[in-house]
Every structure is written in C-alpha cells, then in structure tokens.
Amino acid sequence: MTTPALSIPKVRLATVWLDGCSGCHMSLLDTDERLALLAERVDVVWGPLVDAKEFPENVDVTLVEGAISSEEDLHRIRQVRSRTKILVSLGDCAVNGNVPAMRNQFGANAVLKRAYLENGTLDAQIPRQVIPTLLPVTRPVHELVPVDLFVPGCPPSADLIFSVLSELLEGRMPNPAAKFG
Ligand code: SF4
C-alpha cells in the first residue's frame, strides 16, 4: 500500500506598497530566476500583482515598501500588522521615511497647495475626494506599528532581499547589517 505524499505547507508571503516609488518591489523582481526558487517555498497571498480584495489573515511574512503618509496608509499598516507574524520594513522609505518624508519640513497643506494650486494650469483645485487624506507628517513604519526586521537601501539590492527571504524561509532571523552593511 502506498502512502500519499504529504505536502509541506508553504510560507504565506505578502508585499505591501505604501508611500514608495515601487523601486523596492522592482528590486524584488530583480532576483530574476531566483523567483522560481522562492515560488517553490512561498505562496504570495497579497501584493500589487495579486488579485485579492482584502488583506488576508495569518500571513507569515509581509514586506512593506514605503512610508506612512496618509490615513489610508495608517489604516493599511495597522491591519497588516495585526495579520502578520513577521513584518519587514523594506527599503529606506519604510525604514526612515526617506523621500516621502522630505515634505515634513513644509507641512501637508503647503505641499497640496504647491502641487494642485500653484502648479495647476486648468481649473486648479485641491482634490478632496480622490486622493487619500494626508497625515500632518510622513513617518517610518516602526513609528506606527512594531517592526520585526529592517532592510535598508534605496532600494535594497536584489541579493540582499533574496538573502533575507532565504534566511526567513529557513526559520532564521537575518541580520542585513551584519551581512551587507
Ligand atoms: S526606498 Fe527608494 S526605491 Fe524603495 S520605495 Fe523608497 S525611494 Fe523607492
């Protein structure tokens, strides 16, 4: 009598795009053929290319790109944190605010005025219904929710991202600073 093959459960991986330029996601894609290796070990349950309406429960690892700039970002990161075991700040925008935080010295209203009124050429007005409401200042992820791992870089290299994911898949907590700092 043959025994049915047991399938090893895959790690449930999510990637989240907040206030960032998508460059960190591009760097993840730059792992190229190593994506096939990752695909053997993970199920991508949420991300820019995943057709899901609701961030799922019981996510093992979430990579977060981008800073927290709007009420929508804040709601998202709180939900992600509550549903994720290991939350990773991926890239300098998530780690320290980086480019999105440059607006902090001016304030949200001044930035909106500059973008939509002073630079508007036709029927200039600040949109109130289309863009999410900005927070007074942009903040890195760990200032709003606990973060388990920081992966700096703008963007972090594909090698670094692959190394971090490989370590996590082996059940080890990586130290990016020690390996690549
Ligand atoms: S860290 Fe750099 S590459 Fe990543 S989202 Fe921010 S600006 Fe883009």
Image (spheres, rainbow, N blue to C red):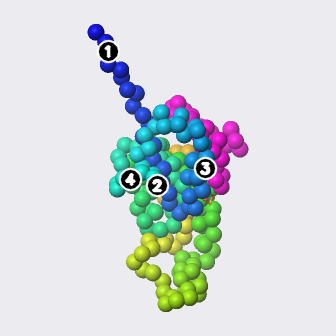
Which residues lie in the magenta part?
Answer: 152-181
Q: Residue at the location (40% across, 27% down)?
A: 8
Residue farthest to the top? 1
**Label 2 is placed on what type of residue?**
Pro
Secondary structure at numbered mark 2: loop
Q: How far across and down, in percent of the image, does residue 45 sit?
A: 40, 46
**Label 1 is placed on what type of residue?**
Thr
Measured Cα–Cα span from mark 4 to mark 2: 8 Å
Q: Which residue is mark 3?
A: 27
Q: Residue at the location (44% across, 71% down)?
A: 132
| Mark 3 vs 1: CB contact within 8 A | no
Going from the N terminus, do you reach mark 3 or mark 1 first? 1
Residue farthest to the left? 1
Mark 3 Cβ inside 8 Å of ligand 1: yes
Q: Within the magenta stretch, is there residue 151? A: no
Q: Which residue is mark 2?
A: 48
Measured Cα–Cα span from mark 2 to mark 3: 14 Å
Choose top left, top right, bottom left or bottom right for residue 108.
Answer: bottom right
Would residue 88 appear left or right of 133 to someone viewing this image? right
Q: Which residue is mark 1?
A: 3
**Label 3 is placed on what type of residue?**
Ser
Secondary structure at numbered mark 1: loop
Q: Which residue is mark 4?
A: 51
Q: Is residue 62 visible?
A: yes
Measured Cα–Cα span from mark 3 to mark 4: 21 Å
Q: Quadrant of ligand 1?
A: bottom right
Residue 120's disc is none
Going from the N terminus, do you reach mark 2 or mark 3 first? 3
| Mark 1 vs 2: CB contact within 8 A | no
